[in-house]
Structures are given as structure tokens and as C-alpha cells.
Amino acid sequence: MTTSLQRLITEADGDAVVSVKAGPTPEEIAAAKKAAEERREARAARAAEREAAKARAAAAARVAEAKEMAEAAQRYGNGQIPSSVLCDLGWAPNQLLRCDAAAELENLNAAFRKAFSRNLDVTDGYRSYAEQLSVAATKGGLAAVPGTSNHGWGQAVDLSGGIESFGTAEHAWMVANAGKYGWKHPAWAQAGGSKPEAWHWEYGTSY
């Protein structure tokens, strides 16, 4: 049996045909890698665009909602606006504003935080009529007549953290940038104004 097996192996070995397939060339390997990388980049780009589209849609929805809420707030008298149609601030939830003003102050705060590594310090936002009476009793002629304050419309904030003083870096930054977001320092509150208040800023008002 051993002899027969050896003879079969010898015969098969002599008749065998060995076929060796050449592997891919370095150029082919490089091309395949490049194609795979391009496919990954294309998938990533499509995913990024889908996320960007979702973000744009969400932002548009927030703007539309803020506008609708702002219109609802305008149906009420000064200092009579219910909290249900006002919006708070993400970093200062105890302060309320008309929703369009709040949305733009959120954007302004993001820019301020990028410049100073901290949030805007909001000391006062919306004031009810009762709160306006209290402020008038405390500040006298420095306060607006109750029922006329822009705080009562949810369109004004008082700020600190450096902004409350003329000549600071924070105040100068606000003067240069707040207008990009619809917020302004009214002329009467400026250093040469009739009632200088460095801390007082307003949204969407006109005189």
C-alpha cells in the first residue's frame, strides 16, 4: 500500500499544473484606497448636509415661534404681559423678555461668550406694572413712569459684568456688536445722553 501510494503521489506530482495569480500592483492598491476614502468622505458630507438641513429647519421653526409669541405679547398692555407669552433666557432663566428679543439676546450672548469666555450678566429684564411701581418708588426720577417703561414691553435689559460702566472693554464690545442682533444703546442712555445709563439696552424700540 505504501509503494502504491508513493507511486500515485509521484505520478500526480509530475502531472500537476500550479497556477499562481499575481496580486494587485501598488498603483492598484493606492487607487482602491483612494476610492474607498472618497466614498467615506461622500457619505460623511451627505450626513453633514442632512444634519445642517435639520439645524436650519429647527432654527427657522424657533424664529417663527418667537415671532408668533412676540405678536401675542403685543396684545397686552405695558407691564401686563403674562409669562406664558414671554420667553426666558437659557443662562438666566429668571429673566423674561418678549420672545423675539430673547432669541436675539441668546445669539448676542453666544458672541459675547466667545469674546469674553462668560455669559452676559442680566440684572433685569421684563418688569410687571407692580415692579415698575417699586422701581419708581426706589429710584424716583431715574425710573420711567410706571406703565411706560420698555422693560414693561419685554424689550429692555439692564446688564452688569463691566457693561454697566462706560469706557470698559465689555461696554465697548456691546457698542460695536449689539446692533448686529437688534439690540441698541438708546441715545438718551449714552454717555452724552439726557439720562446716562451704560447698563440699559433695548431691542426693537424707536424714538
Image: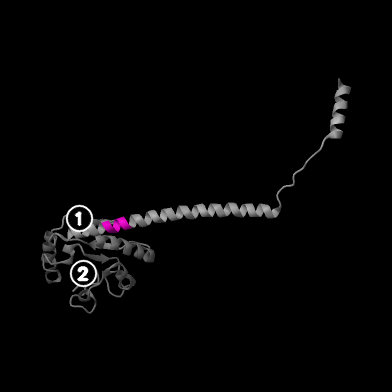
Relative to residue 142, is residue 53 depicted above or below? Answer: above
Can you give x and y, in whole percent of width and height, for residue 145 in the image? 11, 68
Q: Main secondary structure of the magenta part?
A: helix
Scheme of image coloration: one colour
The quadrant holding residue 130 is bottom left
What residue sits right under mark 2 in the picture? Answer: 205
What residue is at 26 percent from the left and 60 percent from the top?
102
Neighbour tally class for label 1: few under 14, some 14-19, many 20 plus, Cα within 10 Å: some
Quadrant in which the C terminus appears: bottom left
Relative to residue 64, is residue 168 depicted above or below? Answer: below
Task: Kindly state the secondary structure of the residue where label 1 is placed.
Answer: helix
The quadrant holding residue 171 is bottom left
Can you give x and y, in whole percent of width and height, for residue 60 in the image? 32, 58
What residue is at 20 percent from the left and 62 percent from the top?
154
What residue sits right under mark 1 in the picture? Answer: 85
Can you give x and y, in whole percent of width and height, for residue 79 in the image? 14, 60
Neighbour tally class for label 2: few under 14, some 14-19, many 20 plus, Cα within 10 Å: some
The answer to whether residue 96 shows anywhere in this view is no
**Three-letter code for the amino acid on which mark 2 is drawn:** Thr
Give the residue furthest to the bottom: 192
Q: Which residues are magenta?
A: 60-64
Contact, mark 2 vs mark 1 (Cβ under 8 Å): no
User: Does the stretch in magenta take in 61?
Assistant: yes
